[in-house]
Amino acid sequence: MIKLDVSDLHLSYGANPILKGVSMQLNQGEVVSLLGPSGSGKTTLLRAVAGLEQPHQGSIRIGERIVFDGAGKVEVPAEGRNLGLVFQSYALWPHKTVADNVAYGLKLRKVASAEVAQRVNAALGQLGLGHLADRYPHQLSGGQQQRVAIARALVYNPPVILLDEPLSNLDAKMREEARAWLRELILKLQLSALVVTHDQAEAMAMSDRILLLSQGRIEQQGTPQEMYGQPASLFAAEFMGSNNRLAGKVVERRGEAVCVAGEGWRLWGSCRDGAALEPGSAATAVIRLERMRLAEVGQADNCLEAELSTSMYLGDRWEHLFHVGAQALRTHTAGPAGAGRSRLHLPVQDLWVFAG
């Protein structure tokens, strides 16, 4: 069942277009992340769905109800859309207890006191916050404040919950723990969630689908596996994951295999841009850090000679920085690398070649 349907949405700030015809759907029990760089339109799209920004074209449907229709002049205000919204800053009332913060939206809706108490207790219990009901926000950790904000969004059983950078205020270790906990909660409660994030690891960990936005348009959408393993453009390939990039020219093509050469190197890769990659054309080859390896003894195919610049110990692996002329390349290994020159292997199927 479709819980949220956005069709051909356009939104501008004055003469500056922010959303340029965005269409998307969110299904029952699904988590969709809006991912992209700053200025791509992801937060604007979330705020338009929430009713906090006014588009000038397109439509938004929540369940069976149209809440915005540019052609039909329909504009349901934010408070009438019955959506759960978790802000980046949590936006908790500092002078209200945890229980009062969670109850706030219900009281605005004139819900009976007995039902308010029952719903607040249930929401706090689901998130493991029952013992904190009488505390104030300043008495809570960042993770606990985040859970209170989510409890407040869930307390009136909204059809869709919107989360705007929900983990950005947490430190790195807590963020990893929180995204696993939040994903588990969403699945357990069968929530339909639209999440804004600029962190691709967070988007992949939490989402059923990812919508990658660029300059107000959806560049690509798909499952985390599709977005990471089958990028449709150079922008998508570079935004998802940590990569090495080699700029050169196409010197030969055999079907979907493309040979690209640059200063001091010549490599075969997999064509990702169809007819645009012909001999003589500019090309960019991209490979994930974890796919490039130190060559085994005697291995010669699709390798290049590189000089080790430095190595960094990361706990679970080593990261090495190599140079091929002016080109810097990074790779991961399980152990340290020998000083001096090394041979790096770039598997043909993992070296994606794009036009430009």
Image: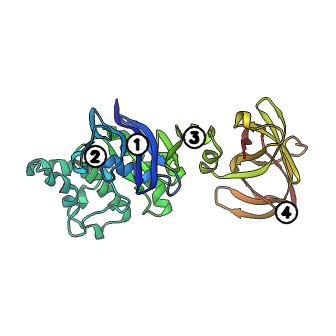
Q: Earlier in the sequence, mark 1 or mark 2?
A: 1
Q: SS at mark 4?
A: loop
How crowded pointer 3 is (Cα within 10 Å; few <14, some 14-19, many 20+) is rated as many
Which of the image's four quarters has the N terminus?
top left
Which circle marks residue 9 in the picture? 1
Q: Could you tell me how far apart the alpha carbons at marks 1 and 2 are, in whole angstroms?
A: 19 Å
- As drawn, which residue projects farthest toward the front? 15
Can I make out residue 127 in this image? no
Give residue 122's position: percent from left, percent from top.
21, 47
For mark 4, what is the residue?
339
From the viewer's perspective, tell me whether residue 330 is left or right of residue 200.
right
From the viewer's perspective, tell me whether residue 206 is left or right of residue 121.
right
Q: Are marks 3 and 1 in contact (CB under 8 Å)?
A: no
How crowded pointer 2 is (Cα within 10 Å; few <14, some 14-19, many 20+) is rated as many
- As drawn, which residue projects farthest toward the right? 298
For mark 2, what is the residue?
83
| Residue 319, image quadrant | bottom right
For mark 3, what is the residue?
227
Q: Could you tell me how far apart the alpha carbons at marks 4 and 2 are, in whole angstroms?
A: 57 Å
